[in-house]
Amino acid sequence: MGYRYANMTDDRRQSHAEVDAIIERALAGDQIGYAELYNRYAASLYRLCYSLLMNVQDAEDILQESFLYAFKNLRRFDSRKASLKTWLYTIAVSRCRNTYRRKRFLTVDITQWLGLELKAPPSEAPEAAVIRRDANESISKALQDLSPRLREAIVLRYGQGMTYREISEVMGCPQKTAESRVRLGHQRLKQSLQPVGMGLLEELLRVR
């Protein structure tokens, strides 16, 4: 376990060093550097925005706004305080909050974006398919019924696989508060999913 943790730490440091080098190139006027940063983080940032906003156009708009702000303020980024990913997520979440304060969203299936959809086995009886479909619908509704802050915590923890420290940085709250929001969100989901089985949530919510 200790050896694996050391390797993970070394890999993370190497990744941060690579990103710092790309940032230096971008700040020196290398447009390819900006493109590399965009390509590295755009997919995960879009997934985050869509999971929170549940609207394709809004998610795309926030994605572009977030990168525009980040690139204009790239000199203000301090890698000693946070990773670039965490900094970008903080920018995006702030803009998502402004958006969903103003709008009421359509009901859509967000479980696929969170990676929480129950997958069908290779061979599945019709009755089992109906049960699985109903379970997925229950999961989607339970997620949408969470308050924005609890949904943010669940999305960041289980959808993005972030640590509690990273969640606290993105959400702008103490780490204990982040842990509490994830725990409360988990409890609310568990309550909502009681009719379809107590073990369902534990099966679905695993940090990947």
Image: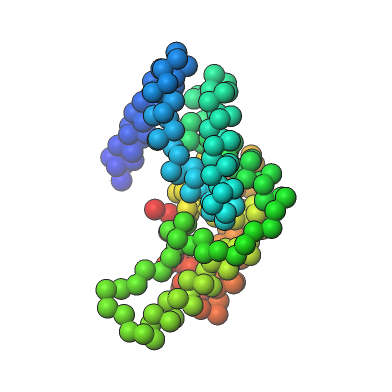
Whole-percent x, y for residue 174 in the image: 63, 41
Number of numbered discs = 0
Q: As drawn, which residue projects farthest toward the front? A: 57
Question: Does the rendering let one see residue 174?
Answer: no
Whole-percent x, y for residue 31 in the image: 42, 21
Q: Left or right of 172: which side holds 133?
A: left
Q: Determine the residue positioned at 47% across, 16% down.
A: 27
Above or below, comparing residue 79 to residue 2 in the picture: above
Q: Determine the residue positioned at 45% across, 39% down.
A: 42
Whole-percent x, y for residue 32 in the image: 38, 23
Which one is in front, 197 or 55? Answer: 55
Q: Left or right of 36: which side holds 123?
A: left
Q: Determine the residue positioned at 54% across, 73% down.
A: 138
Q: As drawn, which residue projects farthest toward the top? A: 28
Question: Does the rendering let one see residue 84?
Answer: yes
Q: Left or right of 100: which side holds 113?
A: left
Q: As drawn, which residue projects farthest toward the bottom? A: 127
Which one is in front, 142 or 3? Answer: 142
Above or below, comparing residue 80 to residue 101 in the picture: above
Q: Determine the residue positioned at 48% across, 75% down.
A: 135
Above or below, comparing residue 205 to residue 12 in the picture: below
Above or below, comparing residue 191 to residue 106 in the picture: below
Which one is in front, 199 or 61? Answer: 61
Report which quarter residue 64 is drawn in.
top right
Q: In the rendered view, how is the structure colored?
A: rainbow
Q: As drawn, which residue projects farthest toward the right? A: 102
